[in-house]
Amino acid sequence: MKADIVTIFPDFFRGPLDHGITRRATEMGLVKIEVHDLRQFTHDRHRTVDDRPFGGGEGMVLKPEPLFECLESLQLPTREERLTGAPKQSVIVLSAQGQRLTQKLATELAALERIVLICGRYEGVDERVIDFLADREISIGDYVLSGGELGAAVIVEAVTRLLPGALGNEASSRQESFTAHAPAETAGADSTCGSGGLLDYPHYTRPAEFRGMAVPEVLVNGNHLEIRRWRREQALRKTLRNRPDLLDGVELTKEDKKILARISGAGHIQN
Ligand code: 9D3
């Protein structure tokens, strides 16, 4: 996978992508990340990348010329070629108006040979970049950031760890054990929802008692069946509390429904 990042803050990426899985994947040659300084594609003395919006309004907009010239320097197939047939590349604008990044979308991107990530700044980019240069517009969530740089780093990390060989054996076998907790054939669980669409159950490590806070007895002395049941209940509890929206898309067993009725204080509701 080749990832090109287009930004007015190239130094921003020295930190996040030089650590952990992205660093190891780079060293292994699984991913090649190239950061392009948008100002290198300006021609004026002040290296201007932004301008005021037509029609008035607050803020500035990334002007099209440097972005088009930068993309042309990357020697990609045309937008039409990318959009017809089975695409191997994608040019993505990071913007607050984009399609939401999900694990499913990360999986789609991980199947590509090349992604180009254009980091919006100020109020955004000239819409002609989105209409004629890019094939996707992605947001990483419903909150306001100051630009696309964090979003680009998030996408690179989410995609890199999906590349074959990027995770050690330890991590990949851990993912397999997740699906074992699912009630039915709900494999392909995503990162937020390990246990068949639910949030993960809580984890503990030594010491068994720390400053008077004890690890739940069942984990220390319980048998495998009790532990499995306890973890399922805890996953249901956490999901109900933190992400009740996820419960709609989850396959629940009779046992799960009983637990939910008990813990949600809706024991009288038949479901
Ligand atoms: C007048 C409304 N604008 C400012 C509050 C909207 C707006 C413009 C530009 C909001 C954010 C931004 C800059 N953000 C990004 O470029 C961005 C982003 C984000 O803000 N949230 C989540 N994902 C992303 S990806 C790029």
Image (tube, rainbow, N blue to C red):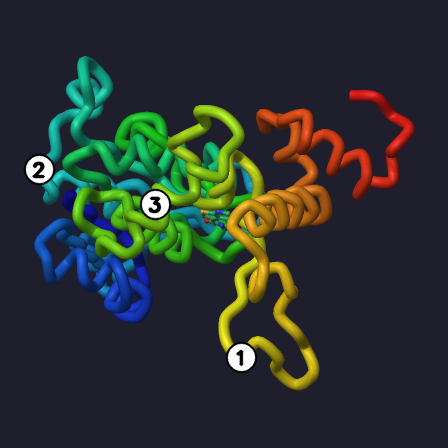
Dot 3, crowdedness within 10 Å: few (<14), some or many (≥20)?
many
Q: Residue 240 placed where, x, y %? A: 71, 42
**Residue drawn at (32%, 37%), measured in percent from left and top?**
92
Q: Amino acid at mark 1?
A: Pro
What label does residue 63 carry, if any?
3
- As drawn, the residue found furthest toward the bottom would be 211
Q: Residue 200 placed where, x, y %? A: 54, 49
Q: Amino acid at mark 3?
A: Lys
**What residue is disc 2 on?**
75
Residue 105 lies left or right of residue 98; in this view the side is: left
Q: CA distance from mark 2 to mark 3?
A: 20 Å
N-term mark: 3 or 1: 3
**What residue is disc 1 on?**
207
**Residue drawn at (39%, 44%), measured in percent from left and top?**
177
Q: CA distance from mark 3 to mark 1?
A: 57 Å
What label does residue 22 carry, if any?
none
